[in-house]
Structure formats: structure tokens, C-alpha cells
Image: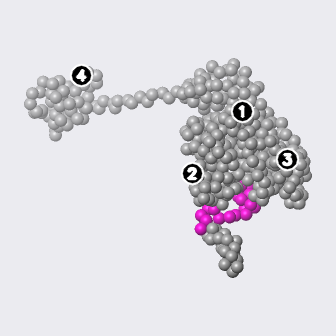
Amino acid sequence: MCVIRIMKLFKTLILPLLAAAFMPLAAQPSSPRQEAESFGRQYAESYDSLMNTYYLRRHAHHSLRHSRQFSIEEFDAMSDSVIARRMRALHTVIPMTYNAEVRQFIRFYLNHMSSRMDVMLTLCEFYHPTFEEALNRYGVPEELKYLTIVESAMNPQATSRVGAAGLWQFMYSTGKIYDLEVNSVIDERRDTYKSTVAAARHLADLHRVFGDWQLAIAAYNCGAGNVNKAIARSGGKRSFWEIYYYLPRETRGYVPAFLAVVYVMNYYEQHGLRPERINLPIRSDTVMVHDDIIMEFVSKYTGVEPDELRTLNPQYRAGYIPGASGAYSLCLPTTAVDRFIAHQDTIIARSADSLTVKPVVVKAPPVKKGHASGGSRTYTVRKGDTLSSIARKHGISVSTLKKRNGIKGDKIRVGQKLKI
């Protein structure tokens, strides 16, 4: 009996301590609150940057119109069973797991979005048709459209501390794999449509590797290699929650954050939030450009403000579209498309004039005094001159110099006139 008790004690107390001791440093447990606070800093940075973009800066006063009745105290008193039942009721392919980690992120997003929900809903209205089309085309669950809120607060100008950029926060190398052009002139990680297609392809590829959408989401954040390492360290477990503590700390919060955002965007009204959608003039259309075009001239001839053009076309880093090297899209307010078409030839011509670089003309040095110009140019031999020094000075060979002057040997005399 004593042996049995000792074995039970070893399993319940000693083994967990040993596991924690040998757990990788990055996988040491942290509280759900700590994970949410870490995401909070990143979310706030992306959101603050978003509010500085053209439309939201111009219409920021609308964000004060919503009715904020959300109460942290009321949420904290809410039963887990209520939230779990609501999450199960969502029509999703991805399992809507509910636990303490997810609850903490729901609390975080409800609190932080309580004064930003109008902005998020307005941007969802603008971006989601594009997201849904691309995700469905590649067989990716439609609910992953909410991943951009976790990634970038739906800010195409967002750039992380490690260099990830755009709505879907692609790193340079991953963007290249999925055909996103990134150079000094253009950064298609910030192109709404192309980056969404790349994200859909990437997520579909990750799902084919892991066969599980939660693991695919985790791999989107930290890379397939880190997820494979976590699976190996867990002894071959194949679900996110089973390999949770073997994943990088940020990834441990990433999947719960996504699940929380899906909940909040579907049930915010049940928590007392009554936002009014901001009436932003962001109805837009796209034209294809096959010539180099400078944005300054687009603005001049269409009447669209430069800041608005930059907001609608964040992928163009240098203020012009390199259309001559391939077909590129130009996004314009719908009201400006006809004006662009009417003035397109002028815009192209003005852009071509500004982009033309005239060849540099290298002028020959002036002829020194005592030298004749043209074909009869001569040189007067000075003391210390030799045939080789004279030839070198005038950029000709010794044989050419001797031939022009009928010289058979190597002798020349001071004062002698030589044809150069």
C-alpha cells in the first residue's frame, strides 16, 4: 500500500515539477492575463497607426458616437456556460474552443474594442467581401477573415517590430514564396487583394501539412517548423491544446486571441456595445495600369487628395506605379474613375516626362594652349619628352604616333612638331 501511495504521489506532484523544470524556457507557463496584455500592446500600436490613416483621421470624431455600455464587472460575473454555448452556436469549420485562455482574450477585446468597435465594423464592411472571395476560392474557412484583426487591427500600413507588414502581416521571405513583390518601389504585402490571396494560399498549405485548422493558424504565426518541434516535444500530440506549452509564447496567445475575436465580432451587442458604423467615403474601384504613372499627376487630374491615394494604394512605396514592367492596379474612389480615364493619356505623358532621365554627356577636356584642334592637332616636343610619354598623354599608341610622323627610330628633338 505504501508503494502505491508513493507512486501516486510521484505522478501527481513530482512528475509535473520535473516536466516544468525541463520545459524549454520559451514554453514556461504564463497566465492568460499576461498573454492578453502582450497582445494588447501590439494591438494598440496597430490601431493607433490605423487612426492616422486618411479616412479615419478625417472622420475620427465619428468614433465618439457609439454607445458604450460594456462593463468589465458584468462580464466577469458572466457564467462560462453562457459564453461556451454561444461559441458552439457559431457556424464555423474551426472548433470554437472555450477555456480560461480564450475567456481572458474575450475580456481583453471587449474592453479594448468598446471604443473602437465602430471602426472595426466599418473596416469589416469594406474588406470582408475581398477576404471572403479569396478564402472561399482556396477552400479556407470564411471565419479566418477575422484573423486580420488579431494580426494588424485591419491596418494595411501596420508593420511589426520584426518587419512583418500589411493586413496579413507577411514577412519578406514568406511574401516572396507566395508571389508578393517587395522592393524599393512596391510592397505587395500591403496590397489588399494580393496579400489576401497569398494568405489564403498559405493557410491552405498549412492545413494540408497539419490537417487541423487550429494548428494551421498557430503555424501561420510561428512557422511550420516551430509547430513540428512542439509536436515532437509533446510526444507526437496533434492538437493545439495538447502542444500548447511547447509552442512559442506569442503563439500560445495567438489562437485564443483569434477565437476571442470571432466571438466578439459576433456577440458584441450581447455585451452592451451599440456602435454606429462610420460613414466613410471608401467606395472604390480598380483600374489596371500598363504604363509608369506618378501619383502626383493622378491626384492633380482626378482631384483625389494625395493622402487618400496613399490610403487606397498602400503598396506603392515610392509615389509611382511601375506599370511599364507589368500590369498593376490603381485603386480610386468610384467618383474619380471617370476622371482618371478621361485624363489617362495626359497623366501618362506627364509621368513619362518626369521619369525620363536624360543621358549624361561627358565633355572632352579643352585643348591646351599650343595644341591645334581637329585633324591637324600637333604637339611641340619639350625637354624630357619621349615617344611613349607623348603617346600616353594623348591616348594613342607609340606605333600610331610614329606612323603619323614618319618616325622610324625612337629619337625626337626638343621643339619638333608632332602630328597627334
Q: Give, as a three-letter code, the residue at label 3.
A: Tyr
> Pointer 3: residues within 10 angstroms few (<14), some, or many (20+)?
some
Residue at the image position 66 percent from the left and 49 percent from the top: 215
Q: Which residue is mark 3?
A: 267
Q: Which coloring applies here?
A: one colour
Residue 137 colored in magenta in the image:
no
Mark 2 Cα within 10 Å, few/some/many (few <14, many 20+)?
Answer: few
Can residue 165 be seen here? The reply is no
Labels 3 and 2 touching (C-beta < 8 A): no
- Residue flagged by tag 2: what amino acid is it? Gly
**In the rendered image, the vertical position of residue 285 relative to residue 103, given as above or below:** above
Would you name the residue on which mark 4 appears?
Answer: 376
Horizontal side of residue 188 vs 280, given as left or right = left
Q: Amino acid at mark 1?
A: Glu
Q: Position of residue 17 (x, y in %)?
A: 65, 71
Which is more N-terminal, label 1 or label 4?
A: 1
